[in-house]
Amino acid sequence: MKLEPSWWRAWREDNLLQGVIRNTGYLFSSNTISMVLASLQGILAAVLLGPAAYGALGVITQYASTVNRLLSFRMGEVVIKYAGQHIQMGRRQEAAAVIKLAALAEALTSVVAYGLLALTAPLAARWIVKDVSTTSIILLYGLALLANLVTETSTAVLQIGGHFRSQALLTLMQNVLTAAWIGVAYLTHGGLYQVLMAYLAGKLLFGVGIALAAGRWMTPMLGPGWQRAPLSLIQGKRKLLTFAVSTNLSGTINLVVRDSEVLWAGFLFTTREAGYYKFAQAMMNIILMPITPFINTTFPEISRQVAARSWAALRRLLRRTSLVAAVWTAACAAGLLLLGPWVLGWLKDGAYLPSLPGMLVLLAGFGTANVLFWNRPLLLSFGMPNYPLGVTATAGALKTVLMLTVARPFGYVAQAVLLSGYFIVSVGLIVRRGLVELRRAEQEDAAAGLPAAGGEPA
């Protein structure tokens, strides 16, 4: 009889980890195919358009996303924390009230965001895209904001309900549609307009589909009549509002500091250099793609374990999911180092080879964020949204000042260095504080004589 190693048995019998991996698997199987499709559509778009037009594509799509996220209160996190905890405690009507409030707030901000986009599109076309003729297609692509009126809330509803397969299927459908559309554009020698319409079609499909899917599961999850749950059932509205505002500010800081890099590149450099930077970031997104499902599935579990004060199980979950992320990230790093020069030298006769230094620099920062992906969800679950906000604001302000004073003379690689440094510093500080809070909670329970929850040690 063959005996299995004790560490493998411990992992296999870890029900919490198995639940996360099972739910992640629904998204990962979709994301595996989506990763291939995203790679294909990105490469086709890059080859079809060339670095300059590819840079313009990145600026236009990211500008619309930036305006939307600028006003977003990240209602998905509000729903996961508050509605998720209500469901855990059997208070389904209170959960329904939180979800309704989140959906209304998100829909309102989406409409306002499109209005802001319409007002600022001419300025973006002139100063960032550096082509005033793109104003109309910025407005057209911005319709994705209206199609995704309640996407954050709907996604959170599916996550706390455990319906990850629905989200995975819609993600796959979105990527299939976008990739097929770009494939047709490539075969017919299309241009920037056709590629933008491909991305818009995918976003329309996902936005409408995710809202319908969430509506489908609301009654089984919350019971009949959830639509009539009054908003007055929500207790601690001030605390909820503070949480939402804090996550909005945190999201805004991330938006300016981390998620608008292509916009900054378009403003600081030529659209060709912005194209190099967009391509480098696109490769990082492929590396991150399999880990993104871990974030979506682990946050609800972290929140549940904190609510249940199951500290041993929580530590085990953080440690083991980080190890999985580290193995994947290391494999990607090895592949990039070994194959990157050869692949880029072949792609469009080496037109994107100048993006390789940026990829290697970004890998350090993105790799850190990959392995410690749970840094912010851990503090959110402890009800501490302000600490990540303070860290990202301080580190982000320093990074932005350096970018505006250093990046332009030294090129887009300097911008990549600053972004990686921001990731390493901010994630490291947030992780340290999260582990301090976890240790403090364990000591409080021990002092109170409460039994340790969470099962066997790792």
Image: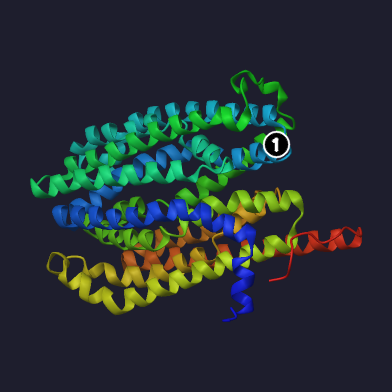
Q: Which residue type does callout 1 highlight?
A: His
Residue 268 lies in quadrant: bottom left
Residue to which mark 1 is pinned: 86
Left or right? Give the position of 58 relative to 387. Answer: left
List the single residue furthest toward the top: 228
Residue 352 lies in quadrant: bottom left
* Residue lying at 48% horizontally and 27% vertically, measured from the top left: 107
In the rendered image, residue 457, in percent from the top left (x then y), is placed at: 72, 70
Residue 9 lies in quadrant: bottom right
* Whether residue 384 is situated above or below residue 74 in the rendered picture: below
List the single residue furthest toward the front: 1
Picture quarter with the C terminus: bottom right
Left or right? Give the position of 370 relative to 95. Answer: left
Picture quarter with the N terminus: bottom right
Q: Secondary structure at mark 1?
A: helix
In the rendered image, residue 293, in percent from the top left (x then y), is placed at: 48, 54
In the rendered image, residue 66, in percent from the top left (x then y), is placed at: 40, 43
